[in-house]
Image (cartoon, rainbow, N blue to C red):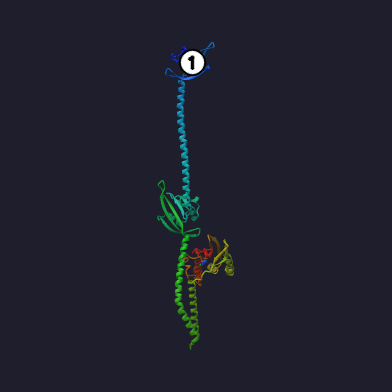
């Protein structure tokens, strides 16, 4: 309490504190208001260079208004509290601001992190898709030759699941020896012939190296399966060789045919018009031999010419299954005699548009060759399936097989290993398949058997070449 005073209109009646400097009652409208209302009032006032809270109330003695009772209270404690509260508010405000900023920073960085991880996942899955879906097999190795990637193509080509090989050393992987040696070798690119699951494959293996972010040298191995390409290449080579042979044969045949006809006519003439006086029997028999040999040469020439001027394809729609059943019926007695079975599996039964007679000849030549290959009992399998607009015909036997050095020759015109063979069968097969826009390939293993695979477009009229 700074002061207490009882004051009438003349001046201070009683008081405590420095009340001598209090202003008179009639100088403040607030006092007058309190007096006229006869009510309690208050104000903030300056007193002796201090700010005070002053409360005042009219003072009545014996029902007569005497003046005012005034009490001045120091505002210092309140100001101190105010200041403290103000400081605290500032500090709390600052802390809240700091907390808010940190939370906002966290939210923003969280969002950025989410965005980055989404982008990272997108890039990762995109590059993963590329690695998984390329047509080549890809194997990645780290600097210790541990497998770090093994794509789908690698799984299907090498018949190994990625789960089993990833994180293991490549040298312990169950891969064909040729592939492991090539991975170890210094050459960056190599052509390999390997046998996987009894199938001979031609592979192109290439290696490239890169350093990862830790500076370690990693290796990428790319394996391309060139087996089909190689088959196609040898088919083209065979086709070229056959047409060159055919041309040469027909050229020679034309040159021989005219003098041969002359010889034939002269011999006939001699037989008819001349009669020797002696050795008549010998004369006729020798003339007969010449006539017969001329006829044989003529037949050979005819076959040369037939080959070089193939019959045109006359396509018609027919059911392949029916044709095969007819061929099976036709061969049945012969097969029975040698205890050979002919199994037919029709995975696809449909209508084809091919030259029926020529395709029949193809199938018969292949079955006949398989039949000839057996000395006694054996099994021939004919499998028909469809794949992407092509009919696949597989003719497989478990006969003696063909030695590796002979395989490249079997499609050559006049190549035969049989005592009574002509060596024309497979050349004709090759030519007819070519004409139908198809391809033929052969796989053979000595003592295991031979498999011919034909792929022919279902509709000759829609064939691409
Ligand atoms: P040919 O049957 O008159 O010998 P081909 O052109 O049909 O003529 O066959 C050529 C050669 O291919 C045969 O002599 C034989 O050596 C070989 N060959 C063809 N098919 C088979 C087979 N299924 N098994 C073993 N050898 C075969």
Which residue sits at x=49%, y=81%? Answer: 291
* Residue 340 in view of the camera: no
What residue is rendered at 48% in x and 82% in y? 265
Of residues 5 and 162, which is closer to you in this image? 5
Residue 97 image position (x, y, % from top left): 46, 32
In x, y percent, where is residue 345?
57, 62
Residue at 47% x, 38% y is: 107
Residue located beneath label 1 in the image: 70
Looking at this view, is 171 or 345 the one in front?
345
Looking at the rendered structure, the number of numbered marks drawn on it comes to: 1
Q: Quadrant of residue 187?
A: bottom left
Q: Is residue 14 above or below residue 214?
A: above
Circle 1 residues within 10 Å: few <14, some 14–19, many ≥20:
many
Q: Is residue 44 visible?
A: yes
Q: In x, y percent, where is residue 404?
A: 47, 64
Position of residue 114 relative to residue 225, above or below, is above
**Which residue occupies 44% across, 54% down?**
222
> Which residue is more in the foreground, 352 or 427?
352
Q: Position of residue 191 (x, y in %)?
A: 43, 59
**Residue sticking out furthest to the top:** 62
Secondary structure under badge 1?
Answer: strand
Label 1 residue near ligand 1, CB within 8 Å: no
């Amino acid at each position: 309490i700074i002061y207490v005073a009882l004051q009438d209109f003349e001046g201070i009646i009683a008081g405590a504190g420095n009340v001598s400097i209090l202003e008179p009652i009639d100088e403040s409208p607030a006092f007058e208001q309190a007096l006229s209302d006869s009510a309690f009032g208050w104000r903030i006032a300056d007193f002796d260079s201090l700010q005070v809270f002053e409360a005042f109330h009219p003072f009545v003695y014996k029902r007569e208004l005497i003046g005012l009772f005034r009490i001045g209270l120091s505002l210092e404690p309140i100001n101190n509290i105010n200041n403290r509260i103000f400081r605290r508010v500032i500090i709390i405000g600052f802390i809240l601001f700091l907390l808010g900023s940190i939370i906002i920073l966290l939210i923003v960085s969280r969002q950025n992190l989410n965005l980055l991880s989404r982008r990272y996942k997108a890039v990762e899955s995109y590059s993963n898709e590329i690695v998984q879906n390329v047509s080549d097999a890809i194997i990645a190795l780290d600097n210790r030759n541990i497998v770090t990637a093994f794509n789908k193509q690698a799984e299907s080509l090498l018949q190994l699941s990625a789960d089993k090989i990833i994180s293991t050393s490549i040298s312990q992987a169950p891969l064909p020896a040729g592939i492991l040696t090539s991975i170890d070798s210094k050459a960056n690119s190599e052509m390999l012939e390997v046998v996987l699951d009894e199938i001979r494959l031609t592979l192109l293996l290439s290696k490239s190296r890169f350093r990862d972010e830790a500076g370690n040298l990693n290796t990428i191995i790319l394996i391309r399966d060139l087996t089909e390409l190689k088959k196609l290449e040898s088919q083209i080579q065979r086709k070229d060789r056959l047409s060159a042979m055919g041309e040469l044969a027909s050229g020679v045949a034309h040159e021989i045919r005219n003098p041969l006809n002359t010889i034939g006519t002269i011999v006939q003439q001699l037989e008819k018009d001349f009669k020797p006086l002696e050795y008549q029997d010998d004369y006729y028999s020798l003339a007969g031999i010449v006539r017969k040999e001329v006829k044989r040469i003529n037949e050979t020439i005819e076959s040369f010419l037939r080959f070089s001027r193939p019959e045109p394809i006359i396509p018609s729609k027919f059911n392949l299954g029916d044709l095969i059943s007819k061929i099976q019926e036709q061969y049945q007695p012969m097969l029975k005699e040698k205890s050979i079975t002919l199994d037919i599996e029709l995975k696809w039964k449909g209508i084809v548009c091919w030259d029926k007679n020529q395709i029949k000849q193809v199938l018969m030549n292949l079955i006949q060759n398989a039949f000839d290959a057996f000395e006694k009992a054996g099994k021939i399998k004919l499998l028909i399936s469809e794949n992407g607009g092509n009919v696949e015909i597989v003719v497989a036997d478990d006969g003696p097989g063909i030695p590796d050095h002979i395989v490249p020759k079997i499609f050559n015109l006049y190549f035969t290993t049989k005592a009574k063979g002509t060596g024309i069968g497979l050349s004709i097969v090759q030519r007819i398949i070519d004409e139908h826009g198809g391809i033929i390939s052969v796989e053979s293993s000595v003592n295991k058997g031979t498999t011919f695979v034909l792929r022919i477009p279902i509709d000759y009229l829609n064939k691409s070449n």
